[in-house]
Amino acid sequence: MGLMSPEQYKASLNDGRLLYYKGEKIEDVAKHHELGVCVDSMAVDYHMAHDSKYKDLAVVYDEALGEDISRFFHVPKDREELLKMLELIIEGTRQGDGYIPLAHDIGADALNAISITAHTMGDQNYIDRIENYRNYLKKEDLAVVAAVTCVKGDRVLRPSDPEQEHPDTYVRIVDKNEKGIVVRGAKAHISGAAYCNEFFVIPSRAMTEKDADYAVAFAIQANAKGIKQIARPVKTKISSLEFPMERPVRVITDSLIIFDDVFVPWDRVFLCGEWQHAATMVYNFALMHRRTGSAYRIPLTEQLVGVAQAIAEYNGVAKVPHVREKITDLVIYLETLKALARSACQEPITYGGIAVPNPMTTNIAKYHFAENYHNAVKIIQDLAGGLLVTAPTYKDYSHPDLKEDIKKYLVGKAGIPTEQRLRMFDLIRRLTSSEFETIVLHGEGSMQAERMTIYAEARKVIKDCKKIAEELAEIEKVSLE
Ligand SMILES: Cc1cc2nc3c(=O)[nH]c(=O)nc-3n(C[C@H](O)[C@H](O)[C@H](O)COP(=O)(O)OP(=O)(O)OC[C@H]3O[C@@H](n4cnc5c(N)ncnc54)[C@H](O)[C@@H]3O)c2cc1C
């Protein structure tokens, strides 16, 4: 089939999937008045592949297939290819006004993590299955996402712990036969699942021998029998209290996916009870996914710097020393994120023939963004002033009895129209909402998950540094950990 057009992608979603939204069953997600806005946001990916301006970034010529494929399904072999993928995610997110288009990005992270795991296991059967599936994705150019996060029940208990409320808090194998496996369980917060073609399902944590039934990975169509999704509500229109916008609204939604005894044929099963290898899959997914996460936060951070500078100028305070310092802090925040994200790609590690972003740097990049986001918001809210929350609305501004008063009294720096200032307040409120705060904290794993990986990756660095200190202090032969 080759690269899908945005129209083909939208038509492909009308496949009988079982999807609920705000308590209603949805017939054709692309035509739904709210979810259709999410579909349009995902379609940005397909537009880019057909736009000559982005072709070099978005598309790769596949020698074996003799056709163009999405860069996301191409195996990244070196730093140049990792950097191109990074730039593609950054550019795609810019095109999505700060929302990652998602059609291939996170699915590709899972695809590569599965492939690395198959190679680490040295299991030719699994290697062949995932490479056949990769070829299928290349040819069909499907929208594919990653369902990793299980609903988990009691977080401290293992999946198989009898003290869990029930045995289905993690997705598990409930049956096997000569044709395939049957799975049950649920995955939460799965971005783009409501309007992708297929999902990768992989474990959300390392497993022990007792958890063998939970060590399962597979690919499945969104319309497979037994799959039910509930998509979270999204805001697809700006409020009538805000200034009207001509730009299309960009937004994504996330689903709770329920697997109610879903059959998966063997050729789509990539892990089935090999509990020792669940950790490899999760670890490699997290590495690539945190690279993806750091990349799409770059356009968002550019927006944060932009609104801070704009509102400081509109308020007339842009040249005041403490304001310049705050803007400088935001620039350091942005440039550090960019440098870390690029550095992670420039110093990759190769696992199973796939170049993987540097584990330490990629975790620090994502952690740096999440850890400092609230400080960035604090700076912006400080520079904006109280009108950010008390300003009259667009409806007041449009009222003939009020407009001239609002224009006169809510003016900032001379020469800047009041409407411009009020529009910037609208944007700042949208950008610094609690919804965004949760996404930056939890997307790609909690901050504690990143800290744990950073510490694990840092063991050698810490040991080497300790050795330097002991040499300086002329302490010989110290053997403690
Ligand atoms: C907007 C959004 C989009 C997302 N998209 C996807 C997606 O596309 N695919 C996907 O698979 N996932 C997705 N996620 C899930 C995301 O990776 C998780 O939210 C994240 O891993 C945290 O898991 P949780 O939400 O279950 O929180 P919890 O795991 O419940 O974490 C809450 C707190 O408990 C702590 N905690 C949890 N377990 C333990 C433990 N055993 N010991 C000590 N402390 C613990 C955490 O550190 C954290 O502080 C998305 C999340 C969001 C918010």
Image (cartoon, grey):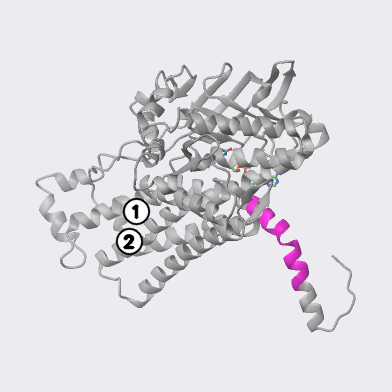
The quadrant of the rendering that contains the N terminus is: top left
- Whether residue 161 is visible here, answered yes or no, is no
Read off the magenta span. 449-465
Does the stretch in magenta take in 272?
no
- Residue 96 is situated, as x and y percent measured from the top left of the image, at 37, 44
Can you tell me which quadrant of the image ligand 1 is in?
top right
Of the numbered discs in the image, which one, if any, rests on residue 404?
Answer: none
Tell me which amino acid carries mark 1. Ile
Question: What separation in Å lies between label 2 and label 1 (alpha carbons)?
Answer: 8 Å
Q: Which residue matches tag 1?
A: 428
Relative to the observer, which residue lies in front, 70 or 43?
A: 70
- Whether residue 242 is visible here, answered yes or no, is yes
* Residue drawn 38% across the image and 27% down it: 8
The residue carrying mark 2 has its beta carbon less than 8 Å from ligand 1: no
Which of the marked residues, 2 or 1, is nearer the chain's N terminus?
A: 2
- Residue 146 is situated, as x and y percent measured from the top left of the image, at 57, 36
Relative to the observer, which residue lies in front, 283 or 354?
A: 354
Q: Are marks 2 and 1 in contact (CB under 8 Å)?
A: yes
Mainly helix, strand or loop, the magenta region? helix
Image check: 411 left or right of 329?
Answer: left
Q: Quadrant of residue 404?
A: bottom left
Relative to the observer, which residue lies in front, 425 or 445?
A: 445
**Quick check: 433 above or below 50?**
below
The quadrant of the rendering that contains the C terminus is: bottom right
* Residue drawn 60% across the image and 50% down it: 77
Q: Quadrant of residue 244?
A: top left
* Residue drawn 34% across the image and 53% down it: 428
Tell me which amino acid carries mark 2. Ala
Q: Which residue matches tag 2?
A: 384
Q: Count residues near mark 2 (Cα–Cα under 10 Å), then give few for <14, some for 14-19, many for 20+.
A: many
- Residue 293 is situated, as x and y percent measured from the top left of the image, at 52, 49
